[in-house]
Amino acid sequence: MDKEIDLSNYKIRTDLLIDEVDHFEKQAIEVNEEVYDDVVVNSTKVLEDNEIKRKGIYTTISFEDVTDRHNFKKVQQVFEKELKKIIENLHLKDDYKTLVIGLGNCNSTPDSLGVKVCDNIIVTRHLYELNEASENYKNVAAFTPNVMGNTGIEASDIIKGIVGSIDVDLIIVIDALASSKIERVNKTIQLTNTGISPGSGVGNYRKEVSENTLNIPVIAIGVPTVVDAVIIVSDTINLLMKKIEYMKNNDAKEKLKAKNRVNYLKEKREQLNDVEKSNLLGLIGQLSDDDLKSFIYEVLSPIGYNMMVTPKEIDFIIEKLSLLISKGINNVIHELQI
């Protein structure tokens, strides 16, 4: 029996421009990609404000690992290069004053990225106020407004109050994000000059922090640390079809090397054809990727199973990523080599 399925309710939870780039018309964006060893930098310029993303530059740094010294340093160098590029494009005065803001909740590990970054920022504003600052360091202040659930105050309102009290030329906001791709969780850093709407990736929309609301240039830096259950289920189905395709194209009886299987599953290539998908999964196999997510949302959401999920090693990864981002900001702003 045919039954119409309502596929309109689910909105993909993501803060990453790169997750949604396929939804843009070609003339609406300009895309450039560079590769440094195995670190990929995607720079996308959105030419006009639209319902997906605000006009501006979105730089996405993708990597496999930051847990060892070599990979950590490699990603840090790329991050510093891209951050410096964005700041230079703002054409600030030489002695610009920076306010670093760490959004998030220190009591929730996946949401603590911004707070932990601020813990390692080299703060000098108080020294400038006392005329004790070294000429080698810029004027930098840092603040963590916490979350509205703990303070009862919008983070953007707290930030407006601070900006109204001190002299600031640049605001750098750091926050944990959500992604619509499992592969990007903890393996992506996004930098943008468009600001940020705290909590938007998890459906908890708060007032935006941007140049439009503060009249000061705002650079937003974020890492996706969570993904919802809909994405996990839909990605698993897609990987299942890829695995079956792999078995079809290779002798299933042959013992295949694990590395070959892993590489194949990660490659972006055509999967089974439409007939094979339909024969394998019926109605599910006939759905597009977006419609599949919407359908799974309709199953999980009413019973409260569309949970936000984070990897089990999140504590260790947050420590590494927060240190990487704080070192990068310190090096770029203060012109250091740490």
Image: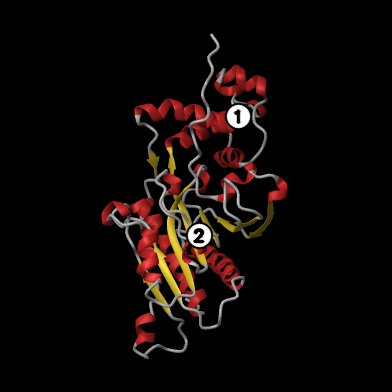
Q: Nearer the viewer, residue 229 or 158?
A: 158
Measured in 3D between alpha carbons, the distance from the residue under mark 2 to the one under mark 1, in whole angstroms, is 32 Å
Q: Amino acid at mark 1?
A: Ser
Q: Residue at x 57, y 65 (%)?
A: 78
Q: Nearer the viewer, residue 154 or 273?
A: 154
In this view of the protein, can residue 150 be seen by the observer? yes
Q: Farthest bottom residue? A: 131
Lateral position of residue 72 relative to residue 300, left or right: right
Q: Farthest top residue? A: 1
Q: Nearer the viewer, residue 127 or 268?
A: 127
| Residue designated by label 2 | 195
Q: Amino acid at mark 2?
A: Gly
Tell me the quarter of the picture where residue 79 sits. bottom right
Q: Position of residue 105 (x, y in %)?
A: 32, 55
Lateral position of residue 162 relative to residue 253, left or right: left
The crowd level at tag 1 (other Cα within 10 Å; few <14, some 14-19, many 20+) is few
Q: Position of residue 30 (x, y in %)?
A: 69, 54
